[in-house]
Image: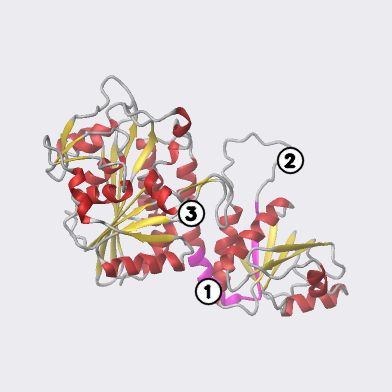
Amino acid sequence: MVNFSNDSVTTIAADLLAIPVDATLSSDALTAISEASNVDLAAAARDERFKGDAGATLLFRSLPGVAARRVVLVGTGTGELKRAGVAVARVARGVRAANVAINGAQRSAGDVGELVHGFGLGAYKFDRHLSPDEDTFAGFESLCVCGAPDAAAAVKDAMAVCDGVLLARDLSNESPNLLYPETLVRAAVEVASQYGFEHQVFNEDALVEKGFNLIVAVGKGSEHPPRLAHLIYRGAGEIKRRIALVGKGVTFDTGGYSIKPGASMLNMHCDMAGAAAVIGAAKAIGELQPAGVEVHFIVPSAENAIANNAYKPQDIFRGYGGQTVEIHNTDAEGRLLLADALAYAGEQNVDTIIDLATLTGACVVALGELTAGLFTNDDALAGSLLGAAKRASEDLWRMPLTAKLDPLLDTPNADMKNVGSRWGGAITAGLFLKRWVKLEAWAHMDIAGPAFAEKEGDFSSEGGTGYAVATLVEFVRTAT
Protein backbone atom coordinates (compact mmCIF):
# COMPACT_ATOMS: atom_id res chain seq x y z
CA MET A 1 0.00 0.00 0.00
CA VAL A 2 1.49 3.34 -1.11
CA ASN A 3 0.64 6.58 0.70
CA PHE A 4 1.99 10.13 0.57
CA SER A 5 3.17 12.55 3.22
CA ASN A 6 4.38 16.15 3.28
CA ASP A 7 5.76 15.83 6.81
CA SER A 8 9.42 16.52 7.40
CA VAL A 9 11.67 13.53 6.84
CA THR A 10 12.79 13.87 10.45
CA THR A 11 9.27 13.21 11.75
CA ILE A 12 8.23 10.33 9.48
CA ALA A 13 7.63 7.31 11.68
CA ALA A 14 8.94 4.36 9.66
CA ASP A 15 10.99 1.25 10.19
CA LEU A 16 13.24 2.44 7.38
CA LEU A 17 13.58 5.83 5.69
CA ALA A 18 15.39 5.88 2.33
CA ILE A 19 17.15 8.98 1.02
CA PRO A 20 18.11 8.71 -2.67
CA VAL A 21 21.35 10.57 -3.48
CA ASP A 22 23.82 10.84 -6.33
CA ALA A 23 27.59 11.34 -6.21
CA THR A 24 27.24 14.92 -4.96
CA LEU A 25 25.55 13.72 -1.76
CA SER A 26 23.49 16.91 -1.88
CA SER A 27 19.89 16.66 -0.71
CA ASP A 28 17.63 18.82 1.42
CA ALA A 29 16.50 15.66 3.21
CA LEU A 30 20.08 14.66 3.93
CA THR A 31 20.76 18.12 5.35
CA ALA A 32 17.62 18.07 7.50
CA ILE A 33 18.48 14.69 9.00
CA SER A 34 22.09 15.70 9.59
CA GLU A 35 20.98 18.84 11.44
CA ALA A 36 18.34 17.03 13.51
CA SER A 37 20.67 14.18 14.51
CA ASN A 38 23.88 16.21 14.76
CA VAL A 39 25.47 13.54 12.53
CA ASP A 40 27.01 14.68 9.27
CA LEU A 41 25.67 11.93 7.02
CA ALA A 42 27.52 13.17 3.94
CA ALA A 43 30.84 13.12 5.79
CA ALA A 44 30.07 9.68 7.19
CA ALA A 45 29.23 8.48 3.67
CA ARG A 46 32.56 9.72 2.34
CA ASP A 47 34.38 8.01 5.19
CA GLU A 48 32.68 4.75 4.16
CA ARG A 49 33.61 5.36 0.51
CA PHE A 50 29.94 5.61 -0.43
CA LYS A 51 29.87 7.41 -3.80
CA GLY A 52 26.20 7.33 -4.71
CA ASP A 53 26.61 4.60 -7.33
CA ALA A 54 23.35 3.16 -8.60
CA GLY A 55 21.99 0.68 -6.07
CA ALA A 56 24.71 1.26 -3.46
CA THR A 57 23.40 1.62 0.09
CA LEU A 58 24.63 2.87 3.46
CA LEU A 59 22.55 2.14 6.56
CA PHE A 60 22.32 4.25 9.74
CA ARG A 61 20.51 3.07 12.86
CA SER A 62 18.76 5.02 15.64
CA LEU A 63 19.79 8.54 14.63
CA PRO A 64 18.97 11.07 17.38
CA GLY A 65 16.16 13.47 16.53
CA VAL A 66 14.89 11.30 13.67
CA ALA A 67 11.62 9.41 14.05
CA ALA A 68 12.53 6.64 11.61
CA ARG A 69 14.25 3.67 13.25
CA ARG A 70 16.76 3.39 10.43
CA VAL A 71 17.90 5.66 7.61
CA VAL A 72 19.46 4.32 4.43
CA LEU A 73 21.25 6.35 1.78
CA VAL A 74 20.70 4.79 -1.63
CA GLY A 75 22.69 5.72 -4.70
CA THR A 76 20.97 6.77 -7.90
CA GLY A 77 24.10 6.89 -10.05
CA THR A 78 23.39 8.84 -13.23
CA GLY A 79 19.64 8.68 -12.77
CA GLU A 80 18.93 4.99 -12.24
CA LEU A 81 15.95 5.50 -9.95
CA LYS A 82 14.39 2.10 -10.55
CA ARG A 83 17.57 0.36 -9.50
CA ALA A 84 17.71 2.53 -6.39
CA GLY A 85 14.16 1.51 -5.51
CA VAL A 86 15.10 -2.17 -5.82
CA ALA A 87 18.02 -1.63 -3.46
CA VAL A 88 15.79 0.03 -0.86
CA ALA A 89 13.42 -2.94 -0.87
CA ARG A 90 16.28 -5.39 -0.41
CA VAL A 91 17.68 -3.47 2.54
CA ALA A 92 14.17 -3.23 4.00
CA ARG A 93 13.65 -6.97 3.73
CA GLY A 94 17.05 -7.59 5.27
CA VAL A 95 16.21 -5.55 8.37
CA ARG A 96 12.54 -6.67 8.40
CA ALA A 97 11.24 -3.16 7.91
CA ALA A 98 7.48 -3.58 7.45
CA ASN A 99 6.83 0.16 7.06
CA VAL A 100 9.13 1.96 4.65
CA ALA A 101 9.38 5.60 3.60
CA ILE A 102 11.21 6.98 0.55
CA ASN A 103 12.07 10.63 0.13
CA GLY A 104 10.73 11.86 -3.18
CA ALA A 105 11.29 15.59 -2.69
CA GLN A 106 13.26 17.42 -5.40
CA ARG A 107 12.40 14.62 -7.82
CA SER A 108 10.18 14.65 -10.89
CA ALA A 109 6.94 12.68 -10.78
CA GLY A 110 8.43 10.24 -13.27
CA ASP A 111 11.50 9.69 -11.11
CA VAL A 112 9.32 9.01 -8.07
CA GLY A 113 7.32 6.53 -10.11
CA GLU A 114 10.56 4.76 -11.06
CA LEU A 115 11.61 4.61 -7.39
CA VAL A 116 8.33 3.02 -6.38
CA HIS A 117 8.36 0.66 -9.35
CA GLY A 118 11.83 -0.48 -8.36
CA PHE A 119 10.77 -0.94 -4.76
CA GLY A 120 7.94 -3.20 -5.90
CA LEU A 121 10.33 -5.32 -7.97
CA GLY A 122 12.84 -5.57 -5.15
CA ALA A 123 10.19 -6.47 -2.59
CA TYR A 124 9.15 -9.55 -4.56
CA LYS A 125 9.91 -12.99 -3.24
CA PHE A 126 8.30 -16.25 -4.36
CA ASP A 127 7.86 -17.92 -0.99
CA ARG A 128 4.28 -19.20 -1.04
CA HIS A 129 5.39 -22.81 -0.62
CA LEU A 130 7.82 -22.18 2.27
CA SER A 131 6.76 -23.10 5.78
CA PRO A 132 7.09 -20.04 8.04
CA ASP A 133 9.25 -20.01 11.15
CA GLU A 134 10.28 -17.42 13.72
CA ASP A 135 12.81 -15.91 11.27
CA THR A 136 10.29 -15.44 8.44
CA PHE A 137 9.72 -11.83 7.43
CA ALA A 138 5.98 -11.18 7.69
CA GLY A 139 6.07 -8.86 4.68
CA PHE A 140 5.72 -5.18 3.85
CA GLU A 141 2.74 -3.29 5.24
CA SER A 142 3.15 0.19 3.77
CA LEU A 143 5.32 2.40 1.58
CA CYS A 144 5.21 6.14 2.24
CA VAL A 145 6.42 8.59 -0.41
CA CYS A 146 7.62 11.80 1.26
CA GLY A 147 7.51 15.27 -0.22
CA ALA A 148 6.09 14.40 -3.65
CA PRO A 149 2.29 14.80 -3.57
CA ASP A 150 2.17 15.56 -7.30
CA ALA A 151 3.61 12.14 -8.10
CA ALA A 152 0.46 10.18 -7.22
CA ALA A 153 -0.58 9.56 -10.84
CA ALA A 154 2.94 8.54 -11.87
CA VAL A 155 3.19 6.20 -8.91
CA LYS A 156 -0.16 4.60 -9.76
CA ASP A 157 0.96 4.00 -13.35
CA ALA A 158 4.31 2.61 -12.24
CA MET A 159 2.67 0.21 -9.82
CA ALA A 160 0.30 -0.99 -12.55
CA VAL A 161 3.29 -2.04 -14.65
CA CYS A 162 5.04 -3.50 -11.61
CA ASP A 163 1.98 -5.57 -10.70
CA GLY A 164 1.95 -6.97 -14.23
CA VAL A 165 5.60 -7.96 -13.89
CA LEU A 166 4.95 -9.61 -10.54
CA LEU A 167 2.02 -11.58 -11.93
CA ALA A 168 4.28 -12.86 -14.71
CA ARG A 169 6.89 -13.82 -12.11
CA ASP A 170 4.32 -15.69 -10.04
CA LEU A 171 3.14 -17.63 -13.08
CA SER A 172 6.68 -18.44 -14.20
CA ASN A 173 7.73 -19.58 -10.73
CA GLU A 174 4.74 -21.77 -9.97
CA SER A 175 5.46 -25.49 -9.82
CA PRO A 176 4.40 -27.55 -12.84
CA ASN A 177 2.09 -29.80 -10.84
CA LEU A 178 0.06 -26.66 -10.06
CA LEU A 179 0.51 -24.66 -13.25
CA TYR A 180 -0.47 -26.51 -16.42
CA PRO A 181 -2.40 -25.41 -19.52
CA GLU A 182 -5.79 -25.23 -17.83
CA THR A 183 -4.57 -23.22 -14.83
CA LEU A 184 -2.37 -20.96 -16.97
CA VAL A 185 -5.33 -20.10 -19.15
CA ARG A 186 -7.47 -19.66 -16.05
CA ALA A 187 -5.05 -16.95 -14.88
CA ALA A 188 -5.52 -15.18 -18.21
CA VAL A 189 -9.29 -15.38 -17.90
CA GLU A 190 -9.12 -13.95 -14.38
CA VAL A 191 -7.34 -10.89 -15.79
CA ALA A 192 -9.92 -10.60 -18.56
CA SER A 193 -12.77 -10.81 -16.08
CA GLN A 194 -11.20 -8.27 -13.74
CA TYR A 195 -10.89 -5.64 -16.46
CA GLY A 196 -13.85 -6.49 -18.66
CA PHE A 197 -11.92 -7.83 -21.64
CA GLU A 198 -13.69 -9.87 -24.26
CA HIS A 199 -12.22 -13.35 -24.02
CA GLN A 200 -12.45 -16.85 -25.40
CA VAL A 201 -10.84 -20.16 -24.45
CA PHE A 202 -10.39 -23.08 -26.85
CA ASN A 203 -10.29 -26.43 -25.05
CA GLU A 204 -8.82 -29.56 -26.60
CA ASP A 205 -11.98 -30.45 -28.52
CA ALA A 206 -12.22 -26.94 -29.96
CA LEU A 207 -8.54 -26.95 -30.90
CA VAL A 208 -9.03 -30.23 -32.78
CA GLU A 209 -12.22 -29.00 -34.44
CA LYS A 210 -10.68 -25.75 -35.65
CA GLY A 211 -7.44 -27.29 -36.87
CA PHE A 212 -4.90 -26.16 -34.28
CA ASN A 213 -3.14 -29.43 -34.98
CA LEU A 214 0.36 -28.34 -33.96
CA ILE A 215 -0.78 -27.24 -30.50
CA VAL A 216 -2.72 -30.49 -30.13
CA ALA A 217 0.31 -32.54 -31.24
CA VAL A 218 2.61 -31.00 -28.63
CA GLY A 219 0.08 -31.61 -25.86
CA LYS A 220 -0.97 -35.15 -26.83
CA GLY A 221 1.32 -36.94 -24.39
CA SER A 222 0.19 -35.06 -21.29
CA GLU A 223 -2.62 -35.79 -18.86
CA HIS A 224 -3.23 -32.03 -18.96
CA PRO A 225 -4.74 -31.23 -22.38
CA PRO A 226 -3.71 -28.13 -24.34
CA ARG A 227 -5.56 -24.83 -24.37
CA LEU A 228 -5.55 -21.52 -26.20
CA ALA A 229 -6.78 -18.28 -24.64
CA HIS A 230 -7.64 -15.12 -26.57
CA LEU A 231 -8.23 -11.86 -24.67
CA ILE A 232 -9.15 -8.57 -26.34
CA TYR A 233 -8.68 -5.08 -24.89
CA ARG A 234 -10.27 -2.14 -26.69
CA GLY A 235 -9.26 1.31 -25.54
CA ALA A 236 -11.50 4.34 -25.49
CA GLY A 237 -11.85 6.59 -28.51
CA GLU A 238 -10.97 5.93 -32.13
CA ILE A 239 -8.86 2.79 -32.51
CA LYS A 240 -5.67 3.76 -34.33
CA ARG A 241 -3.60 0.62 -33.78
CA ARG A 242 -4.48 -3.06 -33.47
CA ILE A 243 -1.76 -5.22 -31.94
CA ALA A 244 -1.54 -8.93 -31.22
CA LEU A 245 0.75 -10.22 -28.47
CA VAL A 246 1.37 -13.97 -28.67
CA GLY A 247 3.16 -15.85 -25.88
CA LYS A 248 4.52 -19.39 -25.83
CA GLY A 249 2.91 -21.29 -22.96
CA VAL A 250 4.74 -24.61 -22.56
CA THR A 251 4.05 -25.26 -18.88
CA PHE A 252 6.66 -28.02 -18.69
CA ASP A 253 9.05 -29.28 -21.33
CA THR A 254 10.57 -32.75 -21.08
CA GLY A 255 11.72 -32.49 -24.68
CA GLY A 256 9.28 -35.24 -25.59
CA TYR A 257 10.83 -38.27 -27.32
CA SER A 258 13.82 -36.03 -28.14
CA ILE A 259 14.22 -36.10 -24.38
CA LYS A 260 16.29 -33.57 -22.49
CA PRO A 261 19.06 -34.74 -20.15
CA GLY A 262 17.86 -34.75 -16.55
CA ALA A 263 19.73 -31.62 -15.50
CA SER A 264 18.33 -29.73 -18.50
CA MET A 265 14.77 -30.36 -17.31
CA LEU A 266 15.29 -28.26 -14.21
CA ASN A 267 13.47 -24.93 -14.51
CA MET A 268 11.50 -26.13 -17.52
CA HIS A 269 8.39 -25.03 -15.65
CA CYS A 270 9.50 -21.56 -16.80
CA ASP A 271 9.13 -22.48 -20.47
CA MET A 272 5.86 -20.57 -20.43
CA ALA A 273 7.52 -17.23 -19.63
CA GLY A 274 6.39 -15.79 -22.98
CA ALA A 275 2.78 -16.52 -22.07
CA ALA A 276 3.37 -15.15 -18.57
CA ALA A 277 4.67 -11.90 -20.08
CA VAL A 278 1.58 -11.58 -22.28
CA ILE A 279 -0.75 -12.19 -19.32
CA GLY A 280 1.22 -9.77 -17.13
CA ALA A 281 1.05 -7.14 -19.87
CA ALA A 282 -2.72 -7.72 -20.12
CA LYS A 283 -3.08 -6.98 -16.41
CA ALA A 284 -1.03 -3.78 -16.64
CA ILE A 285 -2.86 -2.57 -19.74
CA GLY A 286 -6.20 -3.34 -18.10
CA GLU A 287 -5.16 -1.12 -15.21
CA LEU A 288 -3.69 1.68 -17.34
CA GLN A 289 -6.50 1.75 -19.93
CA PRO A 290 -4.56 3.32 -22.83
CA ALA A 291 -6.82 4.98 -25.37
CA GLY A 292 -6.91 4.47 -29.12
CA VAL A 293 -5.46 0.96 -29.19
CA GLU A 294 -6.86 -2.56 -29.47
CA VAL A 295 -4.73 -5.37 -28.09
CA HIS A 296 -5.20 -9.10 -28.62
CA PHE A 297 -3.50 -11.29 -26.02
CA ILE A 298 -3.11 -14.83 -27.40
CA VAL A 299 -1.81 -17.63 -25.20
CA PRO A 300 -1.33 -21.12 -26.71
CA SER A 301 -0.47 -23.61 -23.98
CA ALA A 302 0.57 -27.26 -23.78
CA GLU A 303 2.70 -29.57 -21.66
CA ASN A 304 5.36 -31.42 -23.65
CA ALA A 305 5.31 -34.83 -21.99
CA ILE A 306 6.19 -38.40 -22.96
CA ALA A 307 3.56 -41.13 -23.33
CA ASN A 308 2.54 -43.83 -25.77
CA ASN A 309 0.43 -41.29 -27.67
CA ALA A 310 2.98 -38.44 -27.64
CA TYR A 311 4.05 -36.99 -30.97
CA LYS A 312 7.20 -38.45 -32.52
CA PRO A 313 10.06 -37.47 -34.81
CA GLN A 314 8.97 -37.58 -38.46
CA ASP A 315 5.28 -37.24 -37.64
CA ILE A 316 3.68 -34.77 -40.07
CA PHE A 317 0.90 -32.37 -39.07
CA ARG A 318 -1.05 -29.70 -40.92
CA GLY A 319 -1.05 -26.52 -38.86
CA TYR A 320 -3.80 -23.98 -38.40
CA GLY A 321 -2.43 -21.88 -41.22
CA GLY A 322 -2.76 -24.77 -43.68
CA GLN A 323 0.93 -25.64 -44.01
CA THR A 324 2.40 -29.01 -43.09
CA VAL A 325 5.30 -29.61 -40.71
CA GLU A 326 7.49 -32.68 -40.39
CA ILE A 327 8.78 -33.11 -36.86
CA HIS A 328 12.53 -33.60 -36.68
CA ASN A 329 12.90 -32.73 -33.01
CA THR A 330 10.11 -32.94 -30.43
CA ASP A 331 12.13 -30.59 -28.20
CA ALA A 332 11.53 -27.81 -30.74
CA GLU A 333 7.91 -27.66 -29.60
CA GLY A 334 7.46 -24.00 -28.70
CA ARG A 335 7.61 -22.88 -32.31
CA LEU A 336 4.81 -25.32 -33.11
CA LEU A 337 2.50 -23.69 -30.57
CA LEU A 338 3.46 -20.28 -31.90
CA ALA A 339 2.95 -21.31 -35.53
CA ASP A 340 -0.71 -22.14 -34.95
CA ALA A 341 -1.19 -19.08 -32.75
CA LEU A 342 0.51 -16.72 -35.21
CA ALA A 343 -1.64 -17.94 -38.08
CA TYR A 344 -4.69 -17.38 -35.87
CA ALA A 345 -3.47 -13.92 -34.83
CA GLY A 346 -3.23 -12.99 -38.50
CA GLU A 347 -6.99 -13.48 -38.83
CA GLN A 348 -7.79 -10.90 -36.14
CA ASN A 349 -7.51 -7.79 -38.35
CA VAL A 350 -4.42 -6.57 -36.49
CA ASP A 351 -1.71 -4.38 -37.98
CA THR A 352 1.14 -5.64 -35.77
CA ILE A 353 2.03 -9.03 -34.28
CA ILE A 354 4.66 -9.59 -31.60
CA ASP A 355 5.44 -13.05 -30.30
CA LEU A 356 7.48 -13.91 -27.22
CA ALA A 357 9.06 -17.21 -26.31
CA THR A 358 11.78 -18.92 -24.34
CA LEU A 359 12.58 -20.46 -27.68
CA THR A 360 16.23 -21.38 -28.16
CA GLY A 361 19.39 -22.04 -26.22
CA ALA A 362 21.17 -20.73 -29.31
CA CYS A 363 19.96 -17.22 -28.50
CA VAL A 364 21.42 -17.50 -24.99
CA VAL A 365 24.73 -18.65 -26.49
CA ALA A 366 24.69 -15.61 -28.80
CA LEU A 367 23.58 -12.93 -26.36
CA GLY A 368 24.06 -14.28 -22.85
CA GLU A 369 21.55 -14.67 -20.05
CA LEU A 370 20.55 -11.01 -19.65
CA THR A 371 19.59 -10.00 -23.20
CA ALA A 372 16.70 -11.08 -25.39
CA GLY A 373 16.95 -11.35 -29.16
CA LEU A 374 14.68 -9.33 -31.44
CA PHE A 375 13.94 -10.69 -34.90
CA THR A 376 12.02 -8.62 -37.46
CA ASN A 377 12.40 -7.31 -40.99
CA ASP A 378 10.39 -4.18 -40.13
CA ASP A 379 12.85 -1.42 -39.23
CA ALA A 380 10.20 0.88 -37.80
CA LEU A 381 8.83 -1.86 -35.55
CA ALA A 382 12.36 -2.77 -34.46
CA GLY A 383 13.05 0.84 -33.53
CA SER A 384 9.82 1.10 -31.54
CA LEU A 385 10.49 -2.10 -29.59
CA LEU A 386 14.14 -1.29 -28.91
CA GLY A 387 13.12 2.16 -27.68
CA ALA A 388 10.40 0.68 -25.47
CA ALA A 389 12.86 -1.83 -24.02
CA LYS A 390 15.39 0.89 -23.24
CA ARG A 391 12.78 2.99 -21.43
CA ALA A 392 11.67 -0.13 -19.56
CA SER A 393 15.26 -0.93 -18.46
CA GLU A 394 15.18 -4.28 -20.27
CA ASP A 395 18.00 -5.53 -22.50
CA LEU A 396 16.97 -6.28 -26.08
CA TRP A 397 19.23 -6.70 -29.11
CA ARG A 398 18.25 -6.92 -32.75
CA MET A 399 19.28 -10.11 -34.54
CA PRO A 400 19.18 -10.91 -38.28
CA LEU A 401 16.57 -12.95 -40.10
CA THR A 402 19.07 -14.25 -42.64
CA ALA A 403 17.03 -15.33 -45.66
CA LYS A 404 19.84 -17.55 -46.95
CA LEU A 405 19.25 -19.85 -43.99
CA ASP A 406 15.56 -20.35 -44.76
CA PRO A 407 16.13 -23.40 -47.05
CA LEU A 408 17.52 -25.25 -44.01
CA LEU A 409 13.87 -25.67 -42.97
CA ASP A 410 12.91 -27.46 -46.18
CA THR A 411 12.15 -31.18 -46.29
CA PRO A 412 10.95 -33.36 -49.20
CA ASN A 413 8.15 -34.79 -47.06
CA ALA A 414 6.24 -31.66 -45.98
CA ASP A 415 6.11 -27.91 -46.42
CA MET A 416 8.79 -27.55 -43.75
CA LYS A 417 10.48 -29.25 -40.84
CA ASN A 418 10.58 -27.76 -37.38
CA VAL A 419 14.36 -27.33 -37.06
CA GLY A 420 17.22 -26.16 -39.22
CA SER A 421 20.86 -27.06 -38.73
CA ARG A 422 22.83 -26.78 -35.50
CA TRP A 423 24.26 -23.44 -36.57
CA GLY A 424 22.19 -20.26 -36.37
CA GLY A 425 19.47 -22.04 -34.43
CA ALA A 426 17.89 -18.86 -33.08
CA ILE A 427 17.71 -17.44 -36.62
CA THR A 428 16.17 -20.53 -38.21
CA ALA A 429 13.64 -20.67 -35.36
CA GLY A 430 12.66 -17.12 -36.22
CA LEU A 431 12.50 -17.98 -39.92
CA PHE A 432 10.22 -20.92 -39.11
CA LEU A 433 7.83 -18.56 -37.32
CA LYS A 434 8.02 -16.05 -40.18
CA ARG A 435 6.52 -18.67 -42.50
CA TRP A 436 3.28 -18.45 -40.52
CA VAL A 437 2.91 -14.67 -40.61
CA LYS A 438 1.64 -12.66 -43.55
CA LEU A 439 2.06 -9.22 -41.97
CA GLU A 440 5.26 -7.26 -42.53
CA ALA A 441 4.89 -5.69 -39.08
CA TRP A 442 5.80 -8.81 -37.12
CA ALA A 443 8.48 -9.26 -34.52
CA HIS A 444 9.72 -12.27 -32.60
CA MET A 445 11.38 -11.89 -29.20
CA ASP A 446 13.46 -14.85 -28.05
CA ILE A 447 13.54 -14.31 -24.27
CA ALA A 448 15.22 -17.61 -23.32
CA GLY A 449 18.10 -15.80 -21.59
CA PRO A 450 16.52 -13.09 -19.43
CA ALA A 451 13.22 -14.83 -18.60
CA PHE A 452 14.77 -16.80 -15.74
CA ALA A 453 17.53 -15.80 -13.35
CA GLU A 454 19.75 -18.31 -11.57
CA LYS A 455 20.58 -15.65 -8.99
CA GLU A 456 19.37 -12.22 -7.90
CA GLY A 457 19.94 -9.50 -10.52
CA ASP A 458 19.69 -5.71 -10.69
CA PHE A 459 15.90 -5.82 -10.95
CA SER A 460 14.92 -9.44 -10.36
CA SER A 461 15.02 -12.07 -7.68
CA GLU A 462 16.08 -15.63 -8.37
CA GLY A 463 13.62 -17.42 -10.66
CA GLY A 464 11.16 -16.01 -13.17
CA THR A 465 11.88 -12.37 -13.93
CA GLY A 466 8.73 -11.17 -15.67
CA TYR A 467 10.94 -10.02 -18.53
CA ALA A 468 9.21 -8.18 -21.40
CA VAL A 469 6.08 -7.11 -19.50
CA ALA A 470 7.38 -3.57 -19.09
CA THR A 471 8.60 -3.44 -22.69
CA LEU A 472 5.27 -4.62 -24.07
CA VAL A 473 3.31 -2.14 -21.97
CA GLU A 474 5.58 0.71 -22.98
CA PHE A 475 5.23 -0.30 -26.64
CA VAL A 476 1.42 -0.43 -26.45
CA ARG A 477 1.16 2.89 -24.57
CA THR A 478 3.23 4.68 -27.20
CA ALA A 479 1.81 2.82 -30.22
CA THR A 480 -0.81 5.44 -31.07
* Count of all numbered marks drawn on residues in the image: 3
Taking the spot 58% from the left edge, 51% from the top edge, the residue there is 124
Taking the spot 23% from the left edge, 63% from the top edge, the residue there is 441
| Dot 3 amino acid type | Leu
Q: Which residues are magenta?
A: 140-158
Rendered location of residue 338, percent (x, y): 27, 46
User: How many other residues sit within 10 Å of disc 2, few (<14), some (14-19) or many (≥20)?
Assistant: few
Q: Quadrant of the N terminus?
A: bottom right
CA–CA distance in space, label 1 to label 3? 25 Å
| Residue bearing the label numbered 2 | 135
Does 168 sit left or right of 10 as displayed?
left
CA–CA distance in space, label 3 to label 2? 32 Å
Marker disc for residue 301: none
Rendered location of residue 71, percent (x, y): 76, 65
Q: Quadrant of the C terminus?
A: bottom left
Rendered location of residue 225, percent (x, y): 30, 31
